[in-house]
Amino acid sequence: MKKLIYIALAMLVSANALQAQKTTFKIKGSDTCLPLIQKQSENYMKKNTSTSIMVTGGGSGVGIGALLTGTTEVAMTSRKMKLDEKLKMQDGAKAFKEKIFANDALSIIVHPSNKVSQLTREQLEGIFTGKIKNWKDVGGDDLTIVVYSRETSSGTYEFFKEHVLNNKNFASSALLMPATGAIVQSVSQTKGAVGYVGLAYVEKSVKDIKVSFDKGKTFVEPNVANAQNKTYPITRPLYIYYLTSVEKTITPYIEFLLSAEGQKTVLSEGYVPVK
């Protein structure tokens, strides 16, 4: 009887020891980063079976907010942390670190039937701010333009507003979508539609177009090669923010993201490597 008790106690201690060795952390934020970080986390957990990672989207702002409230250990974002967010982190005594783990190119997408194949930055500004309302004004058919955008909590929304619209407001008629996939689906089903998505989200159901940031002198196709050689103008870094209090836990994961294997996954998933 005593022997059975000892065995049971040994098993319980062993189970508790294994549980204690289990590493768990959450990553929350950018929908742009979501497919890549999900894939990277799956690969990491296969190599590190004692680690459990939960990845959810919601937008860059949501991820940073969760970092501030302590409901996530890691925020993934498609923009830099804002000054007011940094101040809130400071006020909350939340020391953090920033790492760039990949780059991204934003594609302008339209319905496949749209005969417009290229646009200047100025034309994009006109379209997304509502000044240009018909495709015939930019060389297309006589068709009303339907603008799709990410919602305001999205880092992609903020990046696009700053770098493409020169900080001008989106058209009041713009349809704000909660996720990037919803933009792809909506544009694929609406003949007059236009939207913007991360390069990795582009599917055959939509058409991406060339853009010019030199007033129409050169139009560049959105692809990984053009993003890498910096000829495509709408590119940006993707960030990981994490609390220094969990740095020991997160560092091996960050190292994996930046490793040769991790950067190979960045490329295979349709993103732009940093190395």
Image: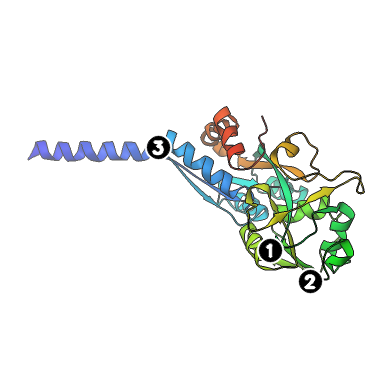
Crowd class of label 2 (few under 14; some 14 to 19; many from 20; radius 10 Å) = few
* Picture disc at residue 173: 2
Please tell me which residue is depicted at 68% across the width and 50% down the height of the picture: 198
* Residue 56 image point, x, y percent: 54, 53
Please tell me which residue is depicted at 75% across the width and 48% down the height of the picture: 82
- Is mark 2 in CB contact (under 8 Å) with mark 3? no
Which element carries disc 2, helix, strand or loop? loop
**Left or right: 46 in relation to 193:** left
Quarter of the picture containing the N terminus is top left
Which element carries disc 1, helix, strand or loop? helix
* Residue 146 image point, x, y percent: 76, 68
**Residue at label 1?**
187
- Residue 47 location, quadrant: top left
**Residue at label 3?**
50
Query: Is residue 255 something that shows in the picture?
Result: yes
Residue flagged by tag 2: what amino acid is it? Answer: Ser
